[in-house]
């Protein structure tokens, strides 16, 4: 157990809908990362936050948004969902944002 | 941006045999991370290398970062069924801090 928690574990929804994924980092970690993993794209970095501020941005679509709250938990919002958004979404956390990342168990999103 | 290429894509090794996975970057690496993933599960941190020529070991797994800091290798000695999984290397890919992973190497350990 890495200490990073993600909810929900599984999510099934329909195209066009909006969902919110939640992540709680390890105690003491200030930085949170979001990743998308699919069979054809591999593990893709979406976005990183450090202490509430956006630090780095990767291949995140405009339909997706994220934020990190004062208590350091983070949410990833996915809207206007498409079939291709079906994937495993991972959250990771690290102490400083420049050290090793610890991954949560992931949220499996299925868009029908 | 930096590309991380892993080789081989997959390998099958008999229990007790050694194996090596390589991770090559198109640019100088400023930090290289190795992770292991069981299918459908989260990644488990193995090791981080930062200095050219650095070598780290944990149990039967050794990782090295070459002097030029453009290639890393992960070596497993006397493989066991518990070593099966997908191994990924990762690094910060540009000055903006964007993190990138290689495509992964799937390891299968046979009896």
Image (spheres, rainbow, N blue to C red):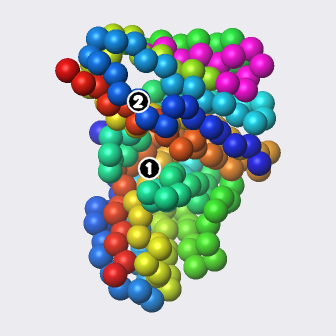
Q: Is residue A30 above or below residue B18?
A: below
Residue positioned 74% across, 43% down in the render: B2
Q: Position of residue A3 (x, y in %)?
A: 35, 42
How much space separates mark 1 and mark 2, taking CA atoms?
A: 34 Å
Provide the residue span drawn in magenta: B61-71
Can see residue A6?
A: yes
Task: Indicate the chain on which mark 2 is placed.
Answer: B
Can see residue A73?
A: no
| In the displayed structure image, the side of residue A18 where residue B2 appears, left or right | right
- Can you identify the residue that label 2 sits on? B11
Q: Residues within 10 Å of mark 1 (few under 14, many from 20)?
A: many
Classify mark 2: helix, strand or loop.
strand
| In the displayed structure image, the side of residue B69 where residue B12 appears, left or right | left
Q: Is residue A8 magenta?
A: no
Task: Indicate the chain on which mark 1 is placed.
Answer: A
- When asked about the image quadrant of residue A49, the answer is bottom right
Q: Position of residue B82 (x, y in %)?
A: 26, 25
Task: Name the mark on residue A77.
Answer: none
- Can you identify the residue that label 1 sits on? A25
Q: Position of residue B25 (x, y in %)?
A: 70, 34
Q: Is residue B83 above or below residue B59?
A: below
Q: Position of residue B44 (x, y in %)?
A: 40, 36
User: Would you say the residues marked 1 and 2 are in contact, meaning their CB atoms lie under 8 Å apart?
Assistant: no
């Amino acid at each position: 157990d890495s200490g990073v928690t993600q909810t929900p574990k599984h999510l099934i929804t329909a195209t066009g809908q909006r969902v919110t994924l939640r992540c709680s980092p390890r105690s003491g970690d200030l930085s949170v990362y979001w990743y998308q993993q699919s069979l054809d794209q591999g593990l893709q970095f979406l976005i990183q936050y450090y202490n509430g501020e956006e630090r780095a941005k990767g291949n995140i679509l405009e339909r997706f948004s994220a934020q990190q709250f004062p208590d350091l938990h983070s949410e990833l919002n996915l809207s206007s969902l498409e079939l291709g958004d079906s994937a495993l979404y991972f959250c990771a956390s690290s102490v400083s944002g420049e050290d090793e990342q610890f991954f949560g168990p992931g949220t499996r999103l299925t868009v029908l | 941006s930096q590309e991380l290429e892993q080789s081989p894509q997959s390998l099958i090794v008999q229990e007790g045999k050694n194996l090596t996975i390589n991770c090559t970057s198109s640019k100088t690496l400023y930090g290289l991370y190795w992770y292991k993933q069981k299918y459908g599960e989260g990644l488990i941190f193995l090791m981080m290398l930062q200095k050219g020529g650095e070598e780290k070991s944990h149990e039967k797994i050794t990782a090295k970062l070459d002097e030029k800091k453009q290639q890393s290798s992960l070596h497993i000695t006397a493989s066991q069924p518990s070593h099966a999984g997908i191994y990924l290397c990762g690094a910060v890919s540009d000055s903006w801090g964007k993190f990138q992973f290689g495509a992964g190497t799937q390891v299968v350990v046979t009896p």
